[in-house]
Image: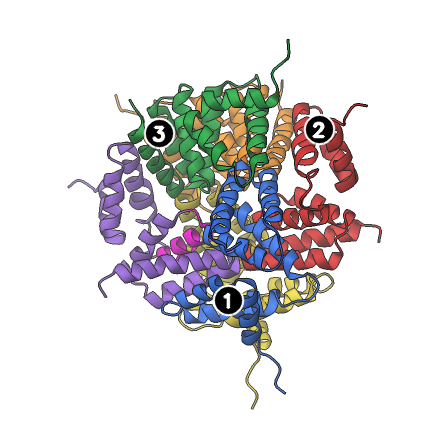
Chain colours: A purple, B yellow, C blue, D green, E red, F orange
Amino acid sequence: MQSETRYERGQRQLARIDGDAGQAVIEALADIAPDFATYLLEFPFGDIYSRDGLNLRDREIATIAALAAMGTATPQLKVHIQAGLNVGLTRQEITEILMQMAVYAGFPAALNGLFAAKEVFAGEHS
Amino acid sequence: MQSETRYERGQRQLARIDGDAGQAVIEALADIAPDFATYLLEFPFGDIYSRDGLNLRDREIATIAALAAMGTATPQLKVHIQAGLNVGLTRQEITEILMQMAVYAGFPAALNGLFAAKEVFAGEHS
Amino acid sequence: MQSETRYERGQRQLARIDGDAGQAVIEALADIAPDFATYLLEFPFGDIYSRDGLNLRDREIATIAALAAMGTATPQLKVHIQAGLNVGLTRQEITEILMQMAVYAGFPAALNGLFAAKEVFAGEHS
Amino acid sequence: MQSETRYERGQRQLARIDGDAGQAVIEALADIAPDFATYLLEFPFGDIYSRDGLNLRDREIATIAALAAMGTATPQLKVHIQAGLNVGLTRQEITEILMQMAVYAGFPAALNGLFAAKEVFAGEHS
Amino acid sequence: MQSETRYERGQRQLARIDGDAGQAVIEALADIAPDFATYLLEFPFGDIYSRDGLNLRDREIATIAALAAMGTATPQLKVHIQAGLNVGLTRQEITEILMQMAVYAGFPAALNGLFAAKEVFAGEHS
Amino acid sequence: MQSETRYERGQRQLARIDGDAGQAVIEALADIAPDFATYLLEFPFGDIYSRDGLNLRDREIATIAALAAMGTATPQLKVHIQAGLNVGLTRQEITEILMQMAVYAGFPAALNGLFAAKEVFAGEHS
């Protein structure tokens, strides 16, 4: 029996974590940089998110915090706020993570993160 | 019976989370900006880290990720790598968080975070 | 006679500095993170902007410069360009601050700051 | 015979590199900061881009990489993706530069750069 | 009578604002990029800092705030903390500017700025 | 005959581009995050730098520009200034790239990049 490739493992993890939003990113890359879609499946999802040693819920805490603190990646922050909900974070926990970013990256970073979360939460079937 | 003030609660949380390193920061501020030491105890520790809704281990995942991704706060990253160990993260979990930052903030951010962790781990009594 | 609380002092300062735009931010937080609205009033406005030692006009020079240089907080930059006008900066002075950011954060940061100012100035009753 | 001024040399270089998009930026500055339009022509274009020692194609590689990595200057990144095409970079080369930024500034920076390029390429007469 | 060149005006302003530290930067560039020393005198100092419309004290408020918020330019932040003192800011005012950066760029940015100021103040003849 | 693995191709590219400095990074990771050394060889070097479509000299222009503009990765900037020399950039070309970053990321970013280059050039056998 063949073992799963990095690409296949990445596809499976992307579907589990990011759902439709992840697939939309892959498709948007098809006409400009299809190889980059492959790398995105293989390295972040096939390698990093597939590792033992930190569970997916904890990984999404780290990703939401990092993207909100950086403040340069609003589309990806929204994808990972949804991803956080998908892997078991509550709305309250995500809100706490974003509020905490005021301490490390300033109040505007926290505010912009909270308003991104507000949009994601509004679009979700609760 | 008097309820604990924000300042007192912040002192208690700082001692619990950052230990001696936190106290050293407070003391280093004494001659230049003593009021800022007060704010540091009151807002981040007395307000944010004292909130329910996200436990301290999860809060340190968020902080380590954010500081490593930003790449502008090495002293504070080291303090919070130690803080992460203090509140229950394992060395392996911290290493996983830092490696994951390669995806969101680039390989140099992850490398510099890992080398900061290496210093903290080396100085710790294991 | 009761002394003013941090929250009350923050409300007064926010109204004075940011006017309606500040109140709109507080209201936008009501359904997602009402506690964060409280912190925003208490720490930045009730604590920092209420301190002696630097007047409000000088504080807004600092804030406009910082937000333009960071380049990650356009909504907040616009609020503080209006705030600068509210507390006594002239349009010319704000334009000079933004132009100067070309030296420290690059020409794109200055350009994006100037275009934000252009929008704010256009919406103002002069 | 008079030698060309910095301003005139900057105008010539801006037209050659950025084309209409550069001129649009100059015009947008006319009512808010006309002196800044002058500086923009004189220093970046009249001084830096007019230097020997690195050709324009190589200069645009550097600019596209820097703006994509910083992630705070999407309008300027688009102008310079078009500028790269104007001075001889191929679409494939620009795509490679942007993909490479995943290594240094993270996958979101690369993705946002690639989507900016997709817009520019779509608007271009090929 | 000849009018002053941008270079000469820049030299005069650099000496007035940054004093010896500015001259040291110019000299450090001599063997690697002497033209860059010229640009540094001409554009930031000969053009920007020589403009009317914002006085030097206000310009240094903006620069100290921006460099502290960015967190990527500690040597330049120290030079401009000294420059602020040279053009009339008090130690207290500089401390207030740096504390305020906690609101916009996070507590680590403010702390690292305050510790930079502590070093500059300690080295100064008071 | 077996085709080269990503890991092997990455090792070959790392040796060619970064030389001893690259190997030193791999070894420094051995006791804290050996898997990250593997990823570093496989993705940046085995995948990205091994791609056709942009030659190594052009890739190093992009990397030097990005790292200097970001200002958060001085050790990696030095490694890639040496890498640039290794793959055919001249000292003058590297100096031009770094000077140009003043336009996009500000004078401090350019200055700190030039001083990093000065250190690398001084340590090199010319």
Helix, strand or loop for disc 2: helix
Residue E70 among those drawn in magenta: no
Question: Is residue E55 in view?
Answer: yes
For label 3, the residue is D95
Comparing E74 with D25, the one in front is D25
Q: Position of residue D20 (x, y in %)?
A: 42, 27
Q: Position of residue F3 (x, y in %)?
A: 28, 24
Image depth: mark 3 or mark 2 in front: 2
Chain assignment, label 1: C
Residue appearing at x 46%, y 66% in the figure: C23
Q: Are marks 1 and 3 on the same chain?
A: no
Prevailing secondary structure of the magenta residues: helix
Label 2 amino acid? Arg
Q: Position of residue F35 (x, y in %)?
A: 40, 43
Question: Is residue F76 in view?
Answer: no
Image depth: mark 1 or mark 3 in front: 1
Comparing C93 with F80, the one in front is C93
Comparing A113 with B62, the one in front is A113
Magenta-colored span = A57-72
Residue A61 among those drawn in magenta: yes
Examine the image and state in which quarter residue B93 appears: bottom left
Chain assignment, label 3: D
Q: Is residue B109 above or below residue B16?
A: above
Helix, strand or loop for disc 1: helix
Q: Outermost residue toward the top?
A: D1
Helix, strand or loop for disc 3: helix
Residue appearing at x 59%, y 27% in the figure: D42
For label 2, the residue is E6
